Image: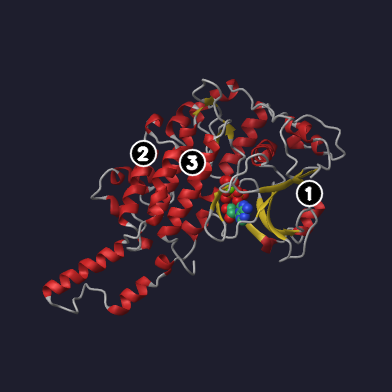
């Protein structure tokens, strides 16, 4: 698709283009991307607004950091559609409140419909369903992250990365148009829904997300994602996981460099300790974030939860002693799963999480290794509930008792076998 205006390169550099849109005149664009005032003010506000933190001890690094290089003008963005604001307004029914899918630091995300192979709006329920993310007028995330999103997702294509269909930049409006992910975010499924996410879906999602990160880390120009968390893992109708939100992504170290020095941004509770302390960013910082999410999937607990007793608010600190002790391990498992999880699966997931969360980044596995470790777990059927049944019936035979108090009767066990946790249905 041909771009409708030729000002992309100018906009990504934050300089005034001669585009008929007044984008470059407006607040976010008028600020050069290298401006430290812009970085500090905009980003700190953004981080606070979206549960993110900037390490105060590391603020000195801000002034010495090299600005991100402007995206190369040679990059091929032709696959991205450029929408007008009016088209997206119509596609979302004038940004109707009841079409809001969610809200993040960037702004609201709306459900909309567009015609196939074009930017024209379609009637609700027809054409292609899309998710339209609109930057808040006060630009909490800001132009810089908007550009990073278009820059990275415009070029990176993988089944485990959400597809960016196009963007809109018109006056001070900044919007992004993505493929619609039917089941929303992992955060929603893990922490908000009344039905617990089945174990098999958790494994499928962990594997998909791990493949997405492995793809980013393994390319000729590695990318560090920097914002791995449950709300950025989106799910399609089959629970395939796709990473979204590349606003904080960063090109990895080049040549013989071991790390990239950068401002400390991310979400509190997911950021690797050495990155928070030093600002040194490597792909192993993402591996740590992956370990936190894996732990959230294992336990059903949030990485930071102020509503829990003080010793349990920080998930990693609370869970670490259990992870390393096989006898205590099962106390970690999300109680909402009851006994509907694979015994070997839990043990392996805990082991992978343990290594991903190593304090020494060098002891963490690569994401390729994580993918290899998780892949066989999809096949495991050794559900704890089945082992409980067989132990129960062995004991009952031994005692020659058919109606022990502790034994599940026929109806109870039938209910458990048909439960959505085992069948994966009705979720
Ligand atoms: N492509 C999409 N399809 C379906 N729902 C989406 C899509 N993108 C985002 N959403 C929904 O909108 C919500 C808000 O997304 P957004 O990325 O703006 O913020 P966030 O990830 O929750 O927070 P943060 O801004 O801190 O990253 C998501 O949690 C998800 O429920
Ligand atoms: Mg997000």
Q: Does the closest atom of ligand 1 sit within 8 Å of the Cβ of label 3?
A: no
Q: Residue 102: in sight, yes or no? A: no
User: Looking at this view, is 77 or 33 the one in front?
Assistant: 77
Identity of the residue drawn at 77% across and 58% down: 115
Q: Residues within 10 Å of mark 2 (few under 14, many from 20)?
A: many
Q: Nearer the viewer, mark 2 or mark 3?
A: 2
Identify the residue position indicated by label 2 in the image.
355
Which type of secondary structure does the marked residue at label 1 adopt?
Answer: loop
Question: Which numbered disc covers residue 83?
Answer: 1
User: Looking at this view, is 416 or 46 the one in front?
Assistant: 416
Question: Which numbered disc covers residue 268?
Answer: 3
Q: Residue furthest left?
A: 399
- Earlier sequence position, callout 2 versus callout 1: 1
Residue 381, placed above or below residue 82: below
Which type of secondary structure does the marked residue at label 2 adopt?
Answer: helix
Identity of the residue drawn at 29% across and 54% down: 330
Residue 68, placed above or below residue 193: above
Image location (x, y in percent) of residue 116: 75, 57
Identity of the residue drawn at 47% across and 26% down: 278
Disc 2, disc 3: CB below 8 Å? Answer: no
Q: Nearer the viewer, mark 1 or mark 3?
A: 1
User: Looking at this view, is 182 or 318 the one in front?
Assistant: 182
- Earlier sequence position, callout 1 versus callout 3: 1
Which type of secondary structure does the marked residue at label 3 adopt?
Answer: loop
Image quadrant occupied by the N terminus: top right
Q: Residues within 10 Å of mark 1 (few under 14, many from 20)?
A: many
How far is the residue under mark 1 from the one under mark 3?
Answer: 34 Å
């Amino acid at each position: 698709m041909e771009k409708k205006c030729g000002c992309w390169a100018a906009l990504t550099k934050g300089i005034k283009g001669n585009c008929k849109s007044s984008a470059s005149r407006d607040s976010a664009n008028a600020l050069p991307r290298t401006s430290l005032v812009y970085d500090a003010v905009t980003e700190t506000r953004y981080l606070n607004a979206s549960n993110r933190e900037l390490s105060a001890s590391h603020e000195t690094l801000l002034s010495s950091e090299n600005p991100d290089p402007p995206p190369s003008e040679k990059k091929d963005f032709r696959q991205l559609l450029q929408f007008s604001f009016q088209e997206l307004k119509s596609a979302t029914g004038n940004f109707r409140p009841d079409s809001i899918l969610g809200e993040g630091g960037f702004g609201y995300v709306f459900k909309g419909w567009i015609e196939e192979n074009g930017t024209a709006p379609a009637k609700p329920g027809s054409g292609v369903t899309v998710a339209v993310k609109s930057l808040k007028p006060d630009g909490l995330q800001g132009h810089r992250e908007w550009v990073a999103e278009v820059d990275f997702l415009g070029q990176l294509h993988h089944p485990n990365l959400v597809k960016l269909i196009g963007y809109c930049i018109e006056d001070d409006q900044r919007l992004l148009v993505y493929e619609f992910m039917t089941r929303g975010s992992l955060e929603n499924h893990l922490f908000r829904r009344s039905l617990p996410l089945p174990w098999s879906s958790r494994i499928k999602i962990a594997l998909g997300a791990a493949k997405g990160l492995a793809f980013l880390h393994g390319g000729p120009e590695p990318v560090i994602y920097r914002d791995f968390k449950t709300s950025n893992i989106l799910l399609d109708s089959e629970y395939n996981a796709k990473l979204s939100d590349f606003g904080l992504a960063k090109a990895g170290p080049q040549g013989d460099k071991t790390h990239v020095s950068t401002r400390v941004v991310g979400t509190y509770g997911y950021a690797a300790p050495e990155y928070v302390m030093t600002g040194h960013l490597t792909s192993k910082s993402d591996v740590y974030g992956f370990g936190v999410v894996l732990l959230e999937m294992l336990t059903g607990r949030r990485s930071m939860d102020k509503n829990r007793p003080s010793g349990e608010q920080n998930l990693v600190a609370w869970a670490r002693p259990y992870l390393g002790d096989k006898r205590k391990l099962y106390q970690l498992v999300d109680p909402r799963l009851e006994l509907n999880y694979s015994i070997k699966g839990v043990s392996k997931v805990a082991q992978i999480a343990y290594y991903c969360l190593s304090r020494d980044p060098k002891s963490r596995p690569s994401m390729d290794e994580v993918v290899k470790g998780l892949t066989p777990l999809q096949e495991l059927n050794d559900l704890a509930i089945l082992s409980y049944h067989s132990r129960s019936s062995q004991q009952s035979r031994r005692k020659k008792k058919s109606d022990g108090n502790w034994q599940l009767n026929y109806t109870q066990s039938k209910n458990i076998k048909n439960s959505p946790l085992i069948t994966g249905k009705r979720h």
